[in-house]
Image: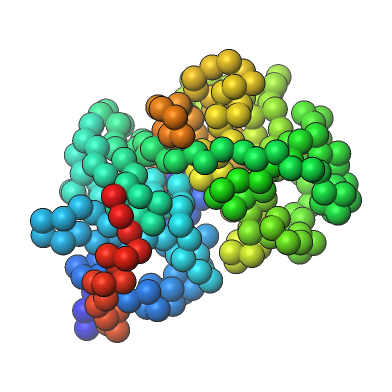
Amino acid sequence: MTTSPALLVEAFTDQPLQGNGAAVVLLDQPATADWMQRLAGSFKQSETAFLHRDAAGPWRLRWFTPTCEVPLCGHATLAATIGLAHWGLLDPGQSLPLATRSGGLQVGLDRSKAHIAHLVLPSSGLIPLEVPETLQTTLGQRIERYWGSPLGYRVALLAAEAPLATMQNPSPQLQGADRMGLVLMQPLAGTAPPLMGAPCDYQLRFFAPGLGIDEDPVTGSAHALVAPWWMEQLQRSQVRGWQASARRGGMLCESVGPGQVRLTGAAQLLWDGQINSSGAGCDPGDWLQAVRL
């Protein structure tokens, strides 16, 4: 029986049993997409990350939900970074690029706190759209602004007084493009949760039933998408975002250049061990086509 190292990290939280769980698998050869998809279905995490590196090449990273491969995933990238550190492949204060379907993503570890990592994600911008009446009816809340994005997510801004944290999950009623990724967000003030020494500025929830995720606990790609808008509103180069899911968590979001956002967050290692990787196969050509720096 062949085995591969694997672990489960709860990302974007400094508390155990919170945040967003992601399995991370370290491969000694580029496994087939079919095997990775079936394994992700067995793990039943919102994403499973697969890491592989040729002897002289960069680290390659792919992400699978229980039902499909996705082009970008923040929390599983944070989890993969923590995994590399746990396996002795990334040192405190060190950074490196990961080749992915969204191009090269720079990741790194905090110099003094091994459970804190950062990653730079692309931020594709928001495209204003007309508010759909069907979505407003589904939510039972007034939508103040509504956007699309090149990432495929739709984004709706709710008023500060809307009960976002306690709102019923709308995934079963979502239609059209909203099913592939819907961000609901609102400003925070007063009793905002603290994060890394300061209160959070906004909070959101994320639903993607079209990707097999009724609600994602803490979504790095969603924060990378909307954080520049909040920075513009608040006239700051960094903001703190909170995700008001049942497994809550958050991250520091900083602008590091046009279309680039650095996310910094804590993570908790839940378990690590070995999985049976018999039957994983080997498909180098698929990996070379799927990822790039």
Give whichever of 85, 263 is nearer the camera.
263
Relative placement, left or right, of 171 versus 270 is right
Total marks drawn? 0
Q: Residue at x 60, y 46 (%)?
A: 149
Name the colour scheme: rainbow
Q: Quadrant of residue 208?
A: bottom right
Q: Is residue 88 above or below residue 4?
A: above
| Residue 57, percent from left and from top | 16, 55
Residue 272 appears in view: no
Q: Is residue 91 left or right of residue 218?
A: left
Residue 66 position, x and y percent, is 51, 69
Q: Quadrant of the N terminus?
A: bottom left
Q: Nearer the viewer, residue 286 or 86?
A: 286
Give the residue at the far top of this rendering: 235
Q: Is residue 85 above or below residue 234?
A: below
Q: Residue at x 37, y 74 (%)?
A: 33
- Residue closest to the eye, 273 or 241: 241
Query: Is 132 located above or below residue 108 in the figure?
Result: below
Residue 178 left/right relative to 33: right
Can residue 101 be seen in the rendering of this structure? yes
Name which residue lies at 86% across and 42% down.
141
Compare residues 33 and 125 and report the one nearer the observer. Answer: 125
Residue 49, percent from left and from top: 38, 60
Query: Can you tell which quarter of the image residue 261 is in?
Result: top left
Question: Which residue extends farthest left?
Answer: 56
